[in-house]
Structures are given as structure tokens and as C-alpha cells.
Amino acid sequence: MRIGIDARKIADYGIGTYIRGLLGGFAEIRGEERYVVLAPASARDLVPLAFEHVVVDAPHYSFRELLIMSRAIERARLDLFHAPHYVVPFTHCPIVVTVHDLIHLRQKLQNRLYARVMIGRAVRKSVRVLTVSESVKRQIVRHFHCDEEKIVVTANGVDEIFRAAEPSRSPAHYFLCVGNDKPHKNVDRLIEAFERVHAEQRDVSLVLAGARFRRFAARAGVITRGFVSAQELSSLYRNALALVMPSLEEGFGLPAAEAMSAGAAVITSNAEALVEITGDAALHVDATSTTALAEAMLRVMSDDALRFDLASRGIARAKSLTWRACAEKTRRAYREAITF
């Protein structure tokens, strides 16, 4: 069975992390399937050596990309095509699509309309729809009136570099926030909450990593690290008082999963997917309230037993979150799609 995977975003974050992790999981399984990775020439070093690399590049989110990808699919003689995001080409080949979240449906009007049309089309055209949490599955069913039997939950994995045997008993004096600076990440409220914490504990810091966060660089106690390598991020997780993830909405919440695996305490909003992924291994707060966020941070900072208990629960909970498990569930979905 020749399975094509659109890996044009393999070098990116977000979807790129998903693609790299999934391909790594397939390589670990070593099944009888033949994987054809459609990706730019510049991505050659990111494609597992055992897989066929077909060089494809096309402008993202354009009509031209649909045509270019359609021709590439036909030339590759695929038995199945997997779109790891909601842009599905024109093809008679059976399709599996991954819908990571529906956050784009709540953005500004132009993006919202585009996302609704394209996600709706992807859900209709695909034989199986993969998603990363039960929360997003329910949203897809509700928004697109999709048969829930068509949707398969394949939770994201955590890279082995983040895994720790036990929590740190003497963390450094900083909280950590990892991600981008988009509105749903709710970083403004986190900064306001941290200002309250910093007013009480002047020696505590807040480290922001992942994006540049330039607009917060001059705030007292705030350290902007920008992009960091996986090795650096692993160290930041392990030595933090806690990861704070105040997102108003998430499809999965990979930083929370990585932080749990690394042995960090975790504080998240009560967004449905974050509660689902972290369970009893995190403090969940109303992240629209700066007071609630600040109180949770102060509580973790002042209670070593609580911090250690959350971190220990996180390590145990994250053990099941592997890219191999994600790949195995995805592989089963491929087989179901082929025999549908």
C-alpha cells in the first residue's frame, strides 16, 4: 500500500512537529506500508531514509497549491493520501485528513470564512478524519454535522528528549510560558497576572519562549527567550516552577504534554482540550481572571509538596503520549479508509 503524506510543512512548528513525530512513529513501527513523503527539496534531511521523498513545493493556502498537489498525487500512484491539515487537493485517491482544531473559525471574518469552507470540504471529502483530542472531535461533529464514527482521535506524542524519570526537587525561580503570541494564547492576561505575583515575590521571573514576545521585553521580571532548541526547551521545562498555559482554546496543548513529561508542574486554563490532556496532573483555572492565574502561580510557588505531586502525576500521565502510539492509531485509520 503506497501512502502519500503532504509534508510541505515538515520544517514548521505546530503542524511540522506533528508531521515529524508521525513519520518518526511510522519509521519505528516498520510496517509493510510504503510511505511517500511529498515535501520540498530543502526538507530532505527531515524525511526518514526508509521513505520515498517526492519533491513538491507549492504556495500554501492557494488554488494553485490544490492543482500542484493533485498532479503530484496522480504521478505518485498512491493508494491513499493523508493531508495533515485541512487543505485537501482535487483527487480520486482516498483521503485521510487531520483537523487539529477549529480555532480558525473564531478569527477575523475573512480567515473564518476560508477556514469554514476548507475544513468543511476536507471533512466531506475524506474517508477518515483524524484529530488530536476528544474535545475537537465533538466540535467537528457539532459544527459540520459529521458522523462521529468517521472521526478517529490520534493524540499527539511527546519527543523522547523531554522525558524525565522524576521531577526536580529544587527548581529555578521562574515560571514558563511556551507558544506563540496569538490572541487565543491569552498572554496579555498572563503578563497581568505575573505582575501581581512579581509584586509579592520580586525574585521570581516569567520566561516566555517560542515567539519573540518583543512587546513584553521591557516588563519587570519578564525574560523573552524567543525560539529555543528542543534541548534548551527540555531544560527550561525541567527547571521551571511550573509551565503556565492560559490559552482560551486549544486543540491539544503540546507544551503542556511536554512539560508534564519533563517533570514540570503545570497550570492551564479550563479550556476543554487542556483539561482532557492534563487531567489531574495540572491546576485548571479560569484564565479570563488575572486573579485566578496569579493565585495559582503563588500557590505552586509556595507549596513544594503540591508542585512535586503535580509534576509526578504529569510524568505518569505523559507516558502514554508517544508518537509511536499516534502512528499506530493513524495506521489503523489508513487501513479502514482503504477498505471502506
Image (cartoon, rainbow, N blue to C red):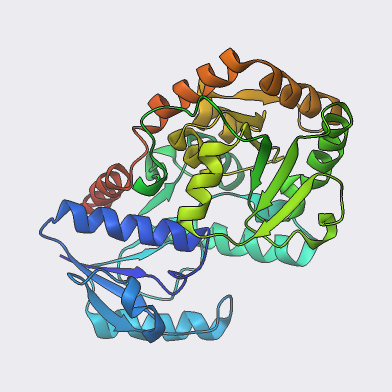
Q: Nearer the viewer, residue 325 or 82?
A: 325
Of all residues, the one furthest to the left in this rendering is 32
Can I make out residue 252 in this image? no
x, y (%) of residue 40?
40, 82
Q: How many numbered dots are placed on residues in this image?
A: 0
Lateral position of residue 163 relative to residue 240, left or right: left
Can I make out residue 3 in this image? yes
Picture quadrant where residue 55 is located: bottom left
x, y (%) of residue 36?
25, 73
Q: Is residue 223 above or below residue 81?
A: above
Q: Residue at x 34, y 46 (%)?
A: 160
Picture quadrant where residue 18 is located: bottom left
Q: Quadrant of the N terminus?
A: bottom left
Lateral position of residue 187 relative to residue 329, left or right: right
x, y (%) of residue 89?
44, 74
Q: Is residue 114 above or below residue 314?
A: below
Q: Residue at x 45, y 54 (%)?
A: 231
Q: Is residue 325 above or below residue 109?
A: above
Q: Residue at x 46, y 69 (%)?
A: 88
Lateral position of residue 246 relative to residue 232, left or right: right
Q: Nearer the viewer, residue 207 or 340?
A: 207
Q: Nearer the viewer, residue 255 or 235?
A: 235
x, y (%) of residue 276?
52, 29
